[in-house]
Amino acid sequence: MSIWSDLTRDEVGAAARSGAVAVLPVGAVEQHGPHLATGADAVLAEHAAKAAVERTGDVMLPVLAYGCSLGHTEHWPGTLSLSVSTLTSMVSDIGRWVHSSGFTKLIVVNSHATNGPPCQSALLTLRYEVPSLRTRFVSLYDITAQAAAGYLADADDPHANDAETSMLLHLAPELVHSDRAVDEADRSVGRVLTYPMPEVTLSGVVGRPTEASAVTGKALFGDIVEAITDLLIRARAETDPLPHGGEQ
């Protein structure tokens, strides 16, 4: 397993020269209802990225545990949110330093929905400022149609739901308090505008976590890891569409 922070400088350099892909897991620290630990998203992103690089020999960066969780507001305790601009800057800075260490490919593995715009803005900036760095953004919940179906089985806009609870029961059951779980319907269905979490859920949950099981979580997590592994293999082998500079 290649974890960036466990490697020496020379080992990092050797990994870069070998063509390894740098993988940045990005999660969040936020309220996850009364039954899940606030670090649930960070745990899922880190475990998924780590399991994939164990298979491929690529390099996982330390998990970026803080995300953009502004939708939860201060209504519930537990959320530690970055602003949109701060998360964008952090991912941009990390990308620049990854490139400075010799890596030419960076994949962001995300587990929290509202991290998408900041992270993708960062990768868009990097594509312009560091054109030799190839990047990709993927999320656990939509990396494949199968993953999306698992995540969205009990809600169109889920949070702390069956899928997340089931995967935590599989990966870190000590972070799940099933006796405190409550179900709450998705009130966003059919609406065309967006709303902060306290206006769509009383409990901080959207979905049916009381139906969660470690068996379901193991299957869904396995499908996600397979998809990330396949992406890393393809990314490592991929060459530029045209010769450098577009010359024929």
Image (spheres, rainbow, N blue to C red):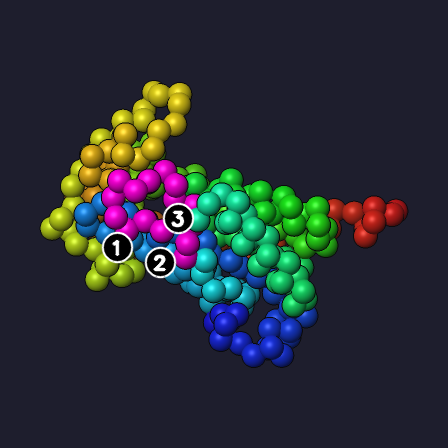
Q: Earlier in the sequence, mark 3 or mark 1?
A: 1
Of the numbered discs 2 and 1, the one sitting upstream in the chain is 1
Distance of mark 3 from mark 2, alpha carbons? Answer: 16 Å
Tell me residue 188's x, y (percent). 32, 26
For the residues labelled 3 and 2, say whether their Cβ atoms are less than 8 Å apart.
Answer: no
Question: Which residue is denoted by mark 3 in the rendering?
Answer: 81
Residue topped by disc 2: 43
**Residue 132 appears in the picture as rendered:** yes
Instruction: Tell me the tag on residue 37.
Output: 1
Residue 248 in percent (x, y) is at 88, 47
**Magenta region, residue range:** 65-80
- Most common secondary structure along the magenta stretch: loop
Of 112 and 77, which appears nearest the observer? 77
Residue 224 drawn in magenta: no
Instruction: Name the side, left or right, on which 209 lies relative to 83.
Output: left
In which quadrant of the rendered view does residue 177 lie?
Answer: bottom left
Q: Tags 3 and 1 in contact by the CB under 8 Å rule?
A: no
Distance CA(mark 3)–CA(mark 1): 15 Å
Q: Residue at x 27, y 34 (%)?
A: 198
Q: Are marks 2 and 1 in contact (CB under 8 Å)?
A: yes
Residue closer to the observer: 166 or 5: 5
Residue 47, above or below 184: below
Which numbered mark, 3 or 1, is in the foreground of this view? 3
Kind of residue at disc 1: Ala
Mark 2–mark 1 distance (CA, rounded to whole Å): 10 Å
What SS does tag 2 mark?
helix
Image location of residue 224, percent across then percent down: 41, 51
**Tag 3, which secondary structure?**
loop
Q: Residue at x 53, y 76 (%)?
A: 7
Q: Is residue 73 magenta?
A: yes
- Can the viewer see residue 216? no
